[in-house]
Image (cartoon, grey):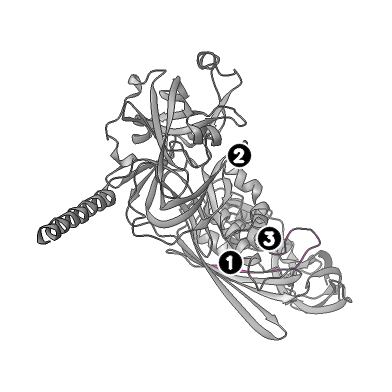
Amino acid sequence: MLTARSQLSKSLCSTVLALLALTVVLCFEPRAAAQESRETLPLAQVKPGMQGYAYTIFAGDQVEKFDLEVLGILDNFLGPKQSIILVQLKGPKVEHTGVVAGMSGSPVYLEGKLAGALSLKLGIFTKEPIAGVTPIQDVLNAPSQPPATQAAAAQQIGLPIEAATRTGLPSGSALEPIDTPLVFSGFQPAVLQQFASQIQGYGFVAAQGGSAAPRADDGHLAAGDMAGMVLVQGDASINSACTVTAVQADRVFLCGHPFLSLGEVQLPMARSRVITTLSSELASTKIVNVGGSIGTITGDRLTAVTGKLGAPPAMIPLDLTLSSSDAGVPKQKTLHFELVNHPKLTPLLVAITTFSGLTQNSLYGEGTTLHLSGEIQLQGHTPVQIENTFAPGDSLSPDGLPIALTMQNVFTRLFVNTFELAKVDRITLRVESVPGRKSFAIESAWLEKGEAAPGETLRVRVLIRPYRGPARVEETTVRVPDQVARGTALRILVSDADLLNRASRGFGFGFAGAGGGPTGLDQLISLLNRERRNDRLYVGLFVPVPTLLWDDKELPNIPLSQINIVDGRPAPGSVQVLRESLASEASIPLGGPVSGVISLNLQIR
């Protein structure tokens, strides 16, 4: 009995130890792609007919292998010394899905060596999954090329006739970059439709997805995993997603082609996790969740997107607060976002995020007048003050869209300035919603008398008509300057804010490089902050004496002799001369957008 028990005990111990050993092996066994040799295969050693394989994720975190065969080499295909390896994918999954959006960057191995990154696809509706592979030397040493040259990579490139003949493909066949999904989480399709033309103009392929909670292993990247750029994060997110080609220490190489050809950048990099792959004859795509930030995207060039693991760069905080009143009870809700700081991306991202946050807010409702206020804080500069009112229109576009377009316009003017890069610290916006349409049209205006003496204060009456309401008369005063010569005819302009802005600053107002435009970021901010608000009725008195606009300075009542002297000194185009000067102005707040203009003449006796 003792011997039998001893044997049984030894047998159980052996079994337990064996299971523990197996568990340790399974736990620490590297993933399939990570087992591959780090050795690379030069393009010169790639030959037609070679058999190989690649790695990607079709669902979950499982990196899967699929086979491929080299069809040929397309020399100088993307440009001088920028060749492409043409391959045919093989296996049940890829023959069912074809080349999938999000597959770009998938590492390709030939003879067990890393040969390149999957990057191009052959058109749509093709029966066979034909793809292009960027050679690994070009991925690891992405060439720096001018933006115009890089942009060509995003277009369809027809196969040369001899290449098509050699590979057995139709002469009209064209290769194009595999789509890199731009994953929108927290955005409804109706929001994206409002900006569809701009999104497509950037070359984005919009896809809806979600976000996943950050995990401890997000930064443990291996070839075949997925990662991408972070453009927006917070209560909604926008991220790109493609496949990792290689990881060398803390350097990451992915996509195999450019995302937007931005060159050197500093954008957050995040892990992407695949839910499933949607098969489609038009365009198969991966449905992904975006995980935690894992580092910085440092380059976006012709043959690869590159990144560095570690802490992500800072983003721009955007706080959007919406307040309204329901049956006299005030309600308020605040959303928080973070956006990348990039001249080409930030204006559009601000517009999309603001519009989405506003219209998808439970306090938002159509048919309300919206008052926008806030500020943009910039490093080393005075904040840009935001204030305007927007009333519902008769068009089918959402009432909140003008707010988004206004914010896009402001950021475009800040970022296209030729003086210095605008570094934004924070954006704070507040939108107050008031039931009903509060807008006003200027119908008529008149003076209490048709002539006045120098120094006299004159009453001006204006007939305004509220939307679907009875007309009413508003009254204000303007003062005639003491120095006006007798017998002079003055002009009184009764108008909305935009027309008075243009009348007093010229039609080049607000555009860098136009006559009278700013010559520095501080001057541009000053001009933005001095723009009149659209919910006021303005009355301006103009005298027939030239105004000299020099950079952001307004010099009214300048004698012609002095204008002739000064006009020759500044750089060409930096001075503008208006034939009259704004001598005084008055305004009446009305609580809603004002439109219209009336011009009156006043004779000085």
Q: Which residue is mark 2?
A: 280
The disc at residue 297 is none
Q: Residue 364 placed where, x, y %?
A: 67, 71
Q: What label sits on residue 401 in the rendered view? A: 3
Image marks 3 and 1: residues in contact by CB distance under 8 Å: no
Which residue has dot 1 on it? 529
Q: To which quarter of the image does residue 173 belong?
A: top right
> Any magenta on residue 57?
no
Which one is in front in this view, the residue at disc 2 or the one at disc 3?
2
Tell me if 259 is positioned left or right of 207 in this view. left
Q: Nearer the viewer, mark 3 or mark 1?
A: 3
Of residues 7 and 601, which is closer to you in this image? 7
User: Which portion, as a residue range, is magenta?
Assistant: 384-402
Give left or right: position of 488 versus 278.
right
Q: Position of residue 305 (x, y in %)?
A: 41, 41
The mark closer to the camera, 2 or 1, is 2
Quote the CA–CA distance across marks 3 and 1.
22 Å
Task: Identify the secondary structure beneath mark 1.
Answer: helix
| Crowd around label 3: few <14 · some 14–19 · many ≥20 (10 Å) | many
Residue 74 visible within the image: no
Of the residues shown, which amino acid type is indicated by label 3?
Leu
Q: Judge the density around disc 1: few (<14), some (14-19), many (≥20) Cα neighbours within 10 Å.
A: some
In the image, residue 249 lies at what x, y percent?
27, 45
